């Protein structure tokens, strides 16, 4: 069994069906990334931001047909994104439905995830991969935005036991969200309500790759573009290391002054702890030292 390919159940997310021939065009006008060029059986990640440029949700948009989209939402309640899209749906003939209870969502990730996928499915050269497991259909879609091997897996007909049995037989290891969190910390992958959410804009959260600065207007565009074009970014996401235990929400200080905050943590070994943090830009250089309750943390990497 490969020790570097994992599958994790994503019960903390929600899934929404978005229906109607104008659904994709509506999301193109409301969210940060370019979606209008997506074809059937393609997918892309985008952000729904507020008028003030704050992140309301991260959406993985899957085009099933011209009038049928599946939205994987990072928010635990589907009502978050349903209410936001409804708010700005004026004349478009579209509808939204929370389908979280009828769909299951998993993530396959790890160094050898791409190799695993090639062995696990037959149509490994297509954008949306499909596998028949115990008579049910599973869709597997690569999320290019993560910059590491990462695949979203959804199904409305395969239970967890059968899916895990199949993936284990192909060399994949089931893990829990603690393991997924550790992977995200190690790879500077921001998580909803920690590194990003209504308290951040996309650029400071390391989500700038989900913003298309050449597309037309969307909610919050003026604010986000101003931050980008005029160098107004106040904070950045950084990866930190320490020999001592640290906790989420710990304050990062320099000479007694708070310059950032710890957002996620993981323990790699007895004397090696890693964390993600949001830190004022001037303190984000690799090697910079912060203090938390008398202990030292150093910057080992910062988000682009």
Image (tube, rainbow, N blue to C red):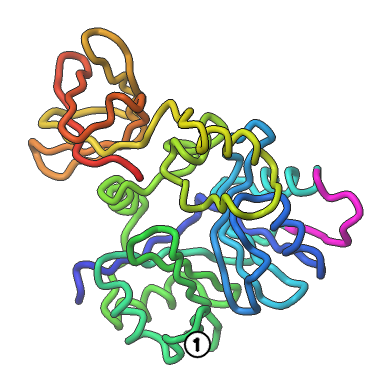
Say whether residue 197 is left or right of residue 77. Answer: left
Q: Quadrant of residue 289?
A: top left
Is residue 99 inside the magenta stretch?
no
Which residue occupies 32% across, 76% down? Answer: 114
Judge left or right: residue 9 versus residue 91. Answer: left
Query: Looking at the figure, which quarter contains the N terminus?
Result: bottom left
* Secondary element at image label 1: strand
Dominant SS in magenta: loop
Can you give x and y, in whole percent of width and height, for residue 241 in the image?
Answer: 17, 35
Q: Residue at x 36, y 80 (%)?
A: 117
Residue ID at (42%, 37%): 195
Q: Residue 139's spot in the image, x, y percent?
A: 52, 77
Q: Residue at x 87, y 58 (%)?
A: 92
Q: Which residue ends up furthest to the bottom in the rendered image? A: 122
Say which quarter of the image contains residue 248.
Answer: top left
Tag 1 residue: 132
149 shown above or below 251: below
Question: Which image quarter is the C terminus in?
Answer: top left
Give the residue furthest to the front: 230
The percent coordinates of residue 4 (x first, y second) are 22, 67
Mark 1 crowd level (few <14, some 14–19, many ≥20, 10 Å Cα): some
Q: Which residues are magenta?
A: 88-97
Residue 156 to residue 118: above or below: above
Q: How many marks?
A: 1
- 137 shown above or below 151: below
Placement of 159 over or under 124, stated as above or below: above
């Amino acid at each position: 069994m490969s020790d570097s390919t994992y599958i994790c159940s994503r019960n903390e997310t929600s899934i929404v069906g978005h229906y109607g021939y104008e659904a994709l065009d509506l999301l193109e006008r409301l969210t940060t990334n370019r979606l209008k060029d997506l074809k059937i059986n393609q997918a892309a990640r985008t952000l729904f931001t507020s008028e003030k440029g704050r992140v309301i949700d991260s959406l993985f948009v899957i085009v099933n047909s011209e009038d049928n989209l599946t939205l994987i939402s990072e928010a635990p309640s589907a009502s978050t994104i349903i209410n936001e899209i409804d708010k700005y749906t004026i004349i478009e003939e579209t509808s939204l439905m929370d389908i979280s209870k009828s769909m299951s969502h998993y993530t396959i990730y790890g160094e050898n995830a791409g190799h695993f996928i090639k062995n696990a499915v037959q149509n490994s050269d297509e954008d949306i991969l499909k596998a028949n497991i115990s008579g049910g259909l599973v869709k597997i879609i690569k999320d290019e935005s993560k910059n590491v091997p990462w695949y979203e897996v959804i199904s409305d007909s395969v239970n967890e036991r059968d899916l895990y049995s199949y993936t284990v037989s192909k060399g994949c290891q089931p893990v829990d969200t603690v393991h997924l969190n550790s992977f995200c910390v190690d790879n500077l992958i921001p998580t909803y309500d920690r590194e990003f959410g209504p308290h951040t804009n996309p650029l400071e959260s390391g989500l700038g790759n989900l913003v298309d600065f050449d597309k037309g207007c969307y909610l919050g565009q003026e604010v986000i573009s101003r931050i980008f074009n005029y160098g107004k970014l106040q904070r950045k996401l950084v990866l930190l290391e320490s020999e001592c235990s640290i906790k989420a929400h710990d304050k990062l200080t320099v000479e007694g002054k708070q310059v950032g905050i710890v957002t996620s943590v993981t323990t790699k070994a007895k004397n090696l702890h890693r964390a993600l943090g949001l830190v004022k830009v001037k303190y984000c250089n690799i090697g910079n030292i912060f203090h938390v309750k008398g202990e030292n943390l150093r910057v080992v990497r910062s988000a682009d």
